[in-house]
Image (cartoon, rainbow, N blue to C red):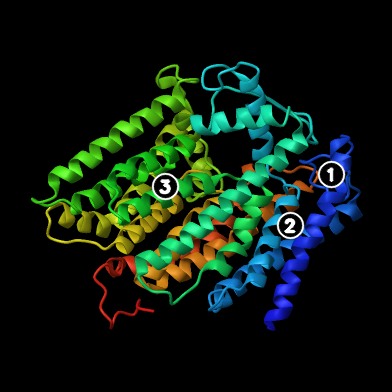
């Protein structure tokens, strides 16, 4: 395939999407067209059958192009030795175009807007029921939320952005997407820098691959998911650990935790990293640095929670979200077996089935992570040591196993979590399975959106409750990386790689 034609075609796709969106912003502002309407391209909620088919074909074509572009970029995107000024301009243009595209079926931006409105009206979303009132969508969303899904830093950001944009939904969404563009650029620059710093070579330049990545552009800039914010804090923590600025590691992670809780899972890896750096000559200095980090993290925590703290109740969201199963391996197994268990156990079916599935998946998780536990124990005993790239690799593997096997709900933007970690780990270790897995999950993930959007055009859309949808997601997105991961695990994830290993690039 001609490289020039691919670039022109890929750029044209984003230009067309942005143009359609800009044309519709006036109608959205005047409330004659809505962000949540599946037929936003046509500015109508009630589509005729012919229009539904036509719009379905358009959606399928859009995502087919994104899928093809993603695969092509992973194959050819690292072949650029020099990133010129013209190429930087092209990449920036892609980001700006993606920023203008109206969110395609995402309900998160309305949630952000509503939470900012609730906080601005004096409500504490962690303690008081608050209204998710989305009157700029069609159908109108109106429900009462009894918990808050994110950390206090995000609540504060939503609050002040709502005040800054004076409650105007279009300005709020464009302002939010501009923040995501800044985050996208910052994550990309830091990822590219860490690749070079940790690997100590410049054999691969990830700049083009990052800034033209369809999944990142679509999930962060179009749909406005803010995973880049906590990933940015994780990348800063990796940088400070690599440069042995231990007093900054925990504060960086703390910021990420109070954005979206998830970075809490990575604290043990950084504690192990710090422990490895300690010896009889440095223990006092390293301990003082760690204590300074604890104090700074405590200050960040207090400042973040002051407006919202009402006791342990603020963490109810973690419990609530852990009970919701959607298009994951857990959901697929659970809903496949549920009719059988209900026929035998009646009202007790849920209790027994949940524990059976979770127990089985826990065994799988422990099996997949055993090589990491074994190596970590050796590091604790000072028998082994990892370079920085191996720590990033361990975090990547742990997060992958957690997401594929343990996470009860699965959404395509979760796959953006792995792109920076995979880039750094691959650059440092040159392990082929990393490249294979990230190529697959970061491109094929868009097919979940195809099913969601096409199903939303039906007269009775309910993909979240359909068993076929869970099987579709697991079969298309998860099966292949799980197979690669299992094969790689049999070689202990190549933590003691020799040149004859089949996993060497």
SS for tag 1?
Answer: helix
Residue 107 is at least partly visible in this image: no
Crowd rating for badge 2 (residues with CA inside 10 Å; few <14, some 14–19, many 20+): many
> Is tag 3's residue or tag 2's residue first in the polypeptide sequence?
2
Residue at the disc numbered 1: 25
Q: Nearer the viewer, residue 242 or 343?
A: 242
Crowd rating for badge 3 (residues with CA inside 10 Å; few <14, some 14–19, many 20+): some
SS for tag 2?
Answer: helix
Question: Where in the figure is residue 190, as x and y percent of width and height?
Answer: 47, 57
In percent of the image, x 66 and y 55: which residue is there? Answer: 218
Say whether residue 108 is left or right of residue 149.
right
Residue 245 — which label?
Answer: none
> Is tag 3's residue or tag 1's residue first in the polypeptide sequence?
1
The outermost residue toward the front is 85
Question: Where in the figure is residue 438, as x and y percent of width and height?
Answer: 49, 65
In percent of the image, x 23 and y 49: which residue is there? Answer: 274
Residue 406 — which label?
Answer: 3
Residue at the disc numbered 2: 97
Say whether residue 347 is left or right of residue 158.
left
Above-or-below relation of 163 to 80 = above
């Amino acid at each position: 395939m001609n490289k020039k034609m691919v670039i022109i075609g890929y750029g044209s796709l984003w230009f067309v999407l942005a143009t359609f969106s800009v044309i519709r912003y006036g109608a959205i502002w005047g409330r004659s067209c809505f962000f949540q309407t599946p037929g936003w391209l046509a500015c109508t909620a009630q589509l005729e059958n012919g229009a539904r088919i036509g719009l379905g074909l358009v959606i399928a074509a859009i995502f087919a192009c994104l899928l093809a572009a993603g695969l092509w970029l992973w194959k050819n995107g690292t072949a650029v030795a020099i990133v010129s000024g013209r190429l930087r301009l092209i990449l920036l243009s892609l980001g700006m175009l993606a920023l203008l595209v109206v969110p395609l079926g995402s309900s998160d931006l309305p949630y952000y807007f509503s939470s900012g409105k609730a906080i601005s009206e004096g409500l504490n979303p962690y303690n008081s029921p608050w209204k998710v009132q989305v009157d700029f969508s069609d159908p109108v969303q109106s429900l009462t939320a009894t918990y808050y899904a994110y950390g206090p830093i995000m609540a504060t950001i939503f609050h002040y952005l709502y005040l800054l944009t004076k409650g105007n939904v279009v300005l709020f969404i464009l302002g939010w997407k501009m923040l995501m563009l800044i985050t996208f650029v910052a994550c990309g620059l830091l990822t590219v820098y860490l690749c070079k710093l940790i690997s100590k070579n410049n054999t691969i330049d990830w700049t083009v691959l990052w800034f033209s990545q369809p999944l990142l552009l679509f999930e962060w800039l179009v749909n406005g998911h803010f995973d880049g914010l906590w990933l940015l804090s994780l990348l800063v923590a990796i940088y400070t650990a690599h440069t042995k600025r231990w007093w900054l590691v925990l504060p960086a992670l703390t910021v990420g935790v109070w954005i979206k809780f998830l970075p809490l899972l990575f604290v043990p890896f950084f504690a192990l990293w710090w422990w490895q750096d300690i010896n009889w000559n440095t223990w006092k200095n390293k301990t003082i640095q760690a204590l300074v980090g604890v104090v700074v993290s405590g200050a960040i925590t207090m400042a973040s929670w002051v407006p919202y703290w009402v006791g342990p109740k603020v963490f109810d969201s973690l419990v609530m979200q852990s009970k919701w199963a959607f298009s994951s391996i857990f959901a697929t197994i659970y809903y496949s077996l549920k009719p059988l268990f209900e026929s035998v156990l009646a009202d007790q079916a849920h209790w027994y089935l949940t524990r059976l599935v979770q127990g089985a998946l826990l065994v799988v998780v422990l099996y997949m992570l055993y090589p990491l536990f074994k190596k970590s124990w050796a590091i604790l005993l000072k028998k082994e040591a990892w370079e920085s790239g191996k720590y990033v690799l361990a975090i990547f593997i742990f997060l992958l196993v957690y997401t594929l096997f343990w996470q009860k709900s699965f959404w395509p933007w979760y796959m953006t979590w792995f792109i920076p970690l995979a880039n750094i780990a691959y650059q440092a270790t040159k392990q082929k399975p990393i490249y294979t897995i990230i190529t697959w999950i970061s491109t094929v993930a868009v097919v979940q959106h195809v099913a969601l959007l096409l199903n939303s055009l039906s007269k009775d859309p309910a993909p979240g409750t359909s068993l076929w949808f869970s099987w579709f997601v697991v079969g298309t997105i998860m099966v292949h990386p799980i197979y690669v991961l299992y094969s790689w695990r049999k070689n202990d994830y190549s933590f003691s790689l020799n040149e004859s290993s089949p996993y060497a690039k």
